[in-house]
Image: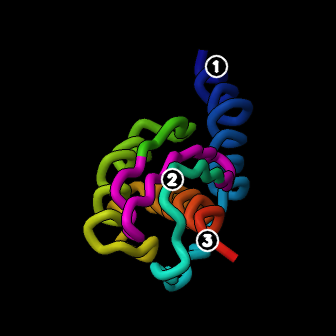
Amino acid sequence: MAKKPILTVLFFIIPYLIFITCGCQIAKPIGKEIDFNRLKDGTYEGRYKQTPNDVIVNVTIANGRITNIQVVKHFSSWIGSKANEIIPQRIIDHQTTQVDAVSGATNSSIVIMNAVQNAIEKAYTD
């Protein structure tokens, strides 16, 4: 009977912990200073993926400012989903994609920031 818990640890829990700690890296922020003079009004889609997070956002630009950010899709852990409302609001409030991450949801926060940055770059006029 004592072998069953040991086998469970060896075959299920240890490989899972190795996958979680080795397979997932924190995303690197790609945020840049926003050139508000070049922003064209409209709604732009941005995407970013950094395993295990995958996000799609719609960013609305009006009068040269970020006025709305909608997280359309965000594959994340339950704790990572905390960033879905907080990070977009911080970006709108500060008008930059370089904002503080949500504690405990760092990767999710950065992935959202990067998706917004990608959308903003689509909004630039030539």
Q: Mark number for residue 14?
A: none
Percent x, y of residue 117: 56, 66
Query: Does the stretch in magenta take in 80?
Result: no
Residue 58 shown left or right of residue 52 in the figure = left
Residue stretch rendered in magenta on the structure: 48-69
What's under tag 2, amino acid-wise?
Gly
The amino acid type, in three-letter code, at marker 1 is: Lys
Label 3 Cα crowd, 10 Å radius (few <14 / some 14-19 / many 20+): some
Instruction: Using the numbered discs, state the Cα–Cα distance from disc 3 to disc 1 in whole angstroms.
Output: 60 Å
Label 2 residue SS: strand
* First in residue order: circle 2 vs circle 1: 1
What residue is at 65 percent from the left and 62 percent from the top?
122
Question: Disc 3 marks which residue?
Answer: 124
- What residue did someone put label 2 on? 42
Q: Label 1 neighbourhood size at 10 Å, few (<14), some (14-19), many (20+)?
A: few
Separation of marks 3 and 2 at Cα, in angstroms: 11 Å
User: Where is 98 relative to 14, above or below?
Assistant: below
Which residue is identified by label 1? 4
> Quadrant where the C terminus lies?
bottom right
Q: CA distance from mark 2 to mark 1?
A: 59 Å
- Identify the residue at horizontal 32%, vertical 47% (top origin): 85
Q: Residue at x 30, y 54 (%)?
A: 86
Viewer-closest of 41 and 13 = 41
Q: Amino acid at mark 3?
A: Tyr
119 vs 83: above or below: below
* Of residues 119 and 54, the one drawn nearer to the viewer in this rendering: 119
Dot 3: what SS? loop
